Amino acid sequence: MRWFATILLVILSLGTAAAQQPPPARVAVAPVFEKQLAPTTVLVGIVDFDQKAGISSETSGLIERHNMVEGAVVRKGDVLVQLNTDFIRKDIALIEQQVAQVDLQIENSQKNLKRFETLYRQDATSEKNFDDLSFGLRELLVDKTRLQISLAKKKLEFEKSRIRSPFNGLVLERHKSQGEWIAPGVPVCMLAAVDDVVVQVPLSEDLMPFVNLGQTLTLTVSALKKEIAGTVKAVVPRVDMKSKTFDVKVAIPYEKRLFQNMSAQVNVPTGPTQRLKMIKRGALVRFQGKTFVYTVKDGKAKILPVQVAAMDGEFFGVDVPYITAGMPVVVDGNERLQPDQAVQVVDAPGTAKE
């Protein structure tokens, strides 16, 4: 009976162990491929608008209405502020009446001059009378020109009473409100160009050889949790005396809710291009400060520690000898995997091309 109890205990132990083993995890894999790529490091930059302007008026006046809502995006030519134009309208009407009056005087003077010209040829009037009338007509024409210039100026003031946006912009600050009086040169708002958004990132001077104008860099705006492709717009030719860093401006497209001074993580090249093994981002697992991926060998998940050397869109590059081109790497279903856990491959996407 003792041997029967022993066998029964072994059977129960094996049954318990088998019951405790999890079923094979269903995973998707993708093969590793190689690509020439520069290694990168992540540096923190600041979102800024490279073109900002304090929008001011060219004329003085009372703000009748405005469309300056902080955070609003305006298009080039949109009216930001409308000044009261009651006095300008009256002035325009008055000058138009004066022009009409001078036109009548000119018409009458031209008729008289024509009559006097006939009389002068017939020696029926003096040369002085004819010259006086001729000069009088010229004075009227000069007066009309002066009035036309004044009228054009008033009409220009009328047009300038509408303060328009000089570019597609985001209203950062509003300085004036409806009912306030403004004078020429006094800003009514601060406007930032949405077509000129940059991420300014400080780089060590040692990295200068690896950053060039027009170069494409990938970055992530922390608050938006969105990856964006940017282009190196400018390399500021000034190195800080203490930190020995210089600033690089990376141009990015404007995104909704992209604010000035937001932080962004920029992938900056740190060396020349090299042959790296490229893995889909979905394969990367982070746990307690460590980064690793899973491969599949003999139907089991095998853990491989990695250190990201470069980022390239939806892929990252590594430079470790135990990861080779063509190796299957788990890209989906790896969140709860354990080392040496049995897996079932249900999908195997094709290899990306260089």
Image (spheres, rainbow, N blue to C red):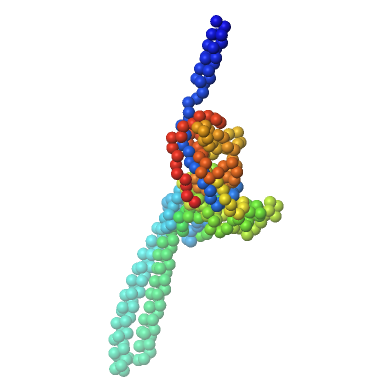
The single residue placed furthest to the bottom in the displayed view is: 123
- Residue 273 percent location from the top left of the image: 58, 53
Depicted 236 relative to depicted 69: above or below = below
In the image shown, does 37 or 257 lie closer to the viewer? 37
- Residue 212 percent location from the top left of the image: 57, 58
- Looking at the rendering, which quadrant does residue 207 occupy? bottom right
Depicted 106 relative to depicted 1: above or below = below
- Residue 334 percent location from the top left of the image: 51, 34
The residue that appears at 29% across and 82% down in the rendered structure is: 111
- Looking at the rendering, which quadrant does residue 246 occupy? bottom right
- Looking at the rendering, which quadrant does residue 112 occupy? bottom left
Q: Can residue 190 be seen in this view?
A: no
The residue that appears at 51% across and 39% down in the rendered structure is: 329
The single residue placed furthest to the right in the displayed view is: 242
Q: Can residue 304 be seen in this view?
A: yes
The single residue placed furthest to the top in the displayed view is: 1
In the image shown, does 111 or 145 lie closer to the viewer? 145
In the image shown, does 41 or 220 lie closer to the viewer? 41
97 displayed left or right of 45: left
In the image shown, does 215 or 56 lie closer to the viewer? 215
The residue that appears at 58% across and 52% down in the rendered structure is: 274
The residue that appears at 63% across and 59% down in the rendered structure is: 237
Which quarter of the image is occupied by the N terminus?
top right
